[in-house]
Image: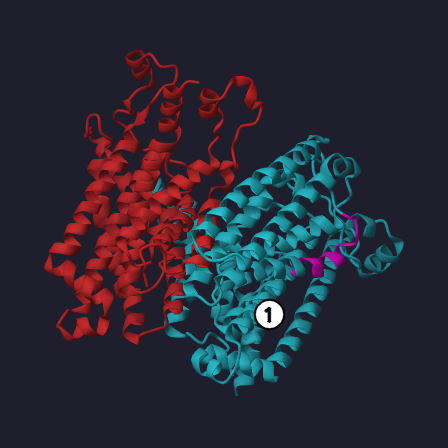
Amino acid sequence: MAAQRNLILFAGVALLFILTGYFQSWNLSLNILNLALLSCIMAIGVNIQWGYAGLFSTGIVGSVALGGLAVVLVSSKPVPDGWAAGGPRIFGALVFAGLVIALAVWLYRQLKPGSTRSLALAAYLVVAFFIYRSILDAGVIATEANNPAQAGNIGGLGLNSLFAWPVGALLAAAGAWVIGKIALGLREDYLAIATLGIAEIIVTVMRNEDWLDRGVKNLTGMPRPWPVPLEIDLQVNPAFLEPVASLGLDPVTASTILVKLLYAGMFGLILLLLVWGCERALNSPWGRTVRAIRDNEISSAAMGKDVKFRHLQIFIIGSAVVGLAGAMMTSMEGQLTPSSYLPLRFTFLIWVMVIVGGSGNNWGSILGGLLIGWLYLAVEFLGPQAMDIVTSGMPAGWLKDHLQDSAAQMRLLSLGVVLLVVLRFAPKGLIPEK
Amino acid sequence: MDTLNALVAFLNFIVIPGLAYGSQLALGALGLTLIFSVLRFSNFAHGDTMAFGTAFVILFTWWFQSMGITAGPLPTALLALPFGILATIAMMLATDRVVYRFYRNQKAKPIIVVIVSTGVMFVMNGLVRMIIGTQEINFGDGARMWLSPQDFKTWTGLAEPLAIKGTAAISVMAALICCALLFWFLQKTRTGKSMRAYSDNEDLALLSGINPERVVMITWIIAGALACIAGTLYGLDKSYRGIVYFSLLMPMFAAAIVGGLGSPVGAIVGSFIVAFSELIVTSAWKKILGYLAPPDWLGDGLYQALSTDYKVAVSFGILIIVLLFRPQGIFGGK
């Protein structure tokens, strides 16, 4: 019965995509599908944190951005001059900062508690910070002065962007380790507040540090991941043109659709692998421990389970999955635009997906990801149309103009209302946890 | 060496902006901390509540201006403020009735209510965008400077000017008045005492006949009024953009947690700690140091620890230090 209901739900979402393809264009429909699949992977990551362990993080956008940064570092084309100008110096400054912090932690543990220790450590960190800046700044200036119109960054390794995906997951995991170490084990709101801050800092760094990723100048022209060809290569490739011509299709449209289908296949495959792994993990002793901790921390602690360690572990795993999706997204788009990392789009939208789909259920997250992902992007063409119908009977005037202009802003309002309604009337979501 | 000029520059670039910004933060953080101590959740919608209230203040300001009503040397927005406060309070009470009350009766876990408050944040943000748009709005009028830099220079003969913006002075005074009223209310009145009792021990308060719904209602009214005032002052001081209020959440949370979440005095102290740290870390000290050290000592640097883009990193850093070493805050909140 439940299985039948779920099938109907998925079929309904599939119908939405088919209708979009039929009435708008297949390119648009596939585009939305690819972004929705990526959102599904992010939703799986959030579901691991929230659904399995009850951790509320508001820093999803930070993990997504770190994933994107991994693509830049691994697969963007090398800039030998930029690296030679300041790269080693910048790298040295970062290593220095790491050593300083490690030493500070070590000293903190070694020294006797008291105000002397606090003052001494504070003074040490301030001095170290200025030394760090004096090492870093010269390198940054040198790198950014190198051909600022086209480069100005240290460049990447120029590898295939497929390699960047696991690196994105690792970067996000490292970020999660730091923040989890600090904020887990306190009141649960503190994790939400701390992650909000760290995400904002990550995005600010990516927007401002031109040496790293060209900042708001955006980094474009990154290579495609391995099996996906460029559309223009396809359009001159006889092996592609002949079958297309025999089917009577337009080669330009066919090539863009083929590329998008390839991405959809890759993303879908990874999504299925992840779900398979998650389902296995949930039904293992590990999964039962985690759910027991979520449902009652005190009794699990009494049973000898290390609550804080499990929380940290899950927080890291969930963030890594989100980072993976972030890397996949940047490598699909072939460019990094730091200003597009908005918390509303990448943190709260994903939350809506997980909660609408059904927290704790992987299939629910996928359904939520596809449905809300479709809705979010479809509102772009549906919203103004709907507003046109609503205002069609109105006389022309400022109210009509105002309403039509505000149609573009409907998105947030409707997302908020959907979230509140689902939380109130169907807190278990569309596909409840078993 | 020119200590006097250095002092004036210090006042001009650090002390006055810090007092103004700290006052604005304090009004916001007070609301956060009150909601936390009575309703027991971190309200993520607070930044957007500020934006919502300010949007209404702007609408009323425009209306007054179109009728030719102004406040003379003061910004017209001050006349519009009471109406904005009423609109915000109405919104708060409506939100509580439609959204939060259900979870309170259910005794839902605080984290669920936090998620609910992000939903409210979405709705408020959407409403603000629909009502007033996302563009930058400058709605200040009246006398811009209470102490103009030119006058100060001619009076004192110093090379370094000192300016006091009207909005900065109004922010500090408004914060003083609001805090005095709030503490009088909490300490002296019956309702205020019942609020404190309810926040200290819910069960005991219920037992002594305090009506919880009334306490909650008054909390929302106070928090809404403070949020609207804070938002308006911030908007007057820095020009208004509905979408930047979301990023005020981080400094406000940091301020409330530094002081001790749930402690009103802590929220005020915390706000000034956050505001001054932000300014000290992100200001360029070259000018001030230039008066104190021989000119050839300084070189080309700006003497700025972090660029102003990293303001959020400062409040985050403070938050991290507190969470690591004193999670209950300076004044020991909950």
Residue shown at the point (17%, 55%) measured from the top left: B186
Q: Which residues are magenta?
A: A157-169
Residue shown at the point (26%, 53%) measured from the top left: B264
Asked if residue A270 lies in the magenta stretch, the reply is: no
Indicate how the structure is coloured in the image. by chain
Q: Farthest residue in the right direction?
A: A238
Q: Is residue A320 above or below residue B83?
A: below
- The chain coloured cyan is A
Assign the magenta stretch its main secondary structure: helix
Name the spot of residue A150 as percent of width and height, x first. Answer: 71, 34
Q: Is residue B128 above or below residue A6?
A: above
Name the spot of residue A48 as percent of width and height, x first. Answer: 56, 71
Secondary element under disc 1, as helix, strand or loop, is helix
Report which residue position mark 1 lands on. A14
A431 or B45, nearer to the observer: B45
User: What is the number of callouts on the image?
Assistant: 1
A106 displayed left or right of B209: right
Q: Amino acid at mark 1?
A: Ala
Asked if residue A167 lies in the magenta stretch, the reply is: yes
A264 or A41, nearer to the observer: A41
A380 or A198, nearer to the observer: A198
B12 displayed left or right of A351: left
Q: Chain of mark 1?
A: A
Name the spot of residue A97 as percent of width and height, x first. Answer: 62, 47
B11 or B210, nearer to the observer: B11
B71 displayed left or right of A406: left
- The chain coloured red is B
Residue shown at the point (81%, 58%) measured from the top left: A244
Q: Is residue B197 visible?
A: yes
Q: Is residue A17 visible?
A: no
The crowding category of the residue bearing disc 1, from other C-alpha atoms within 10 Å (few below 14, some 14 to 19, many at least 20), is some
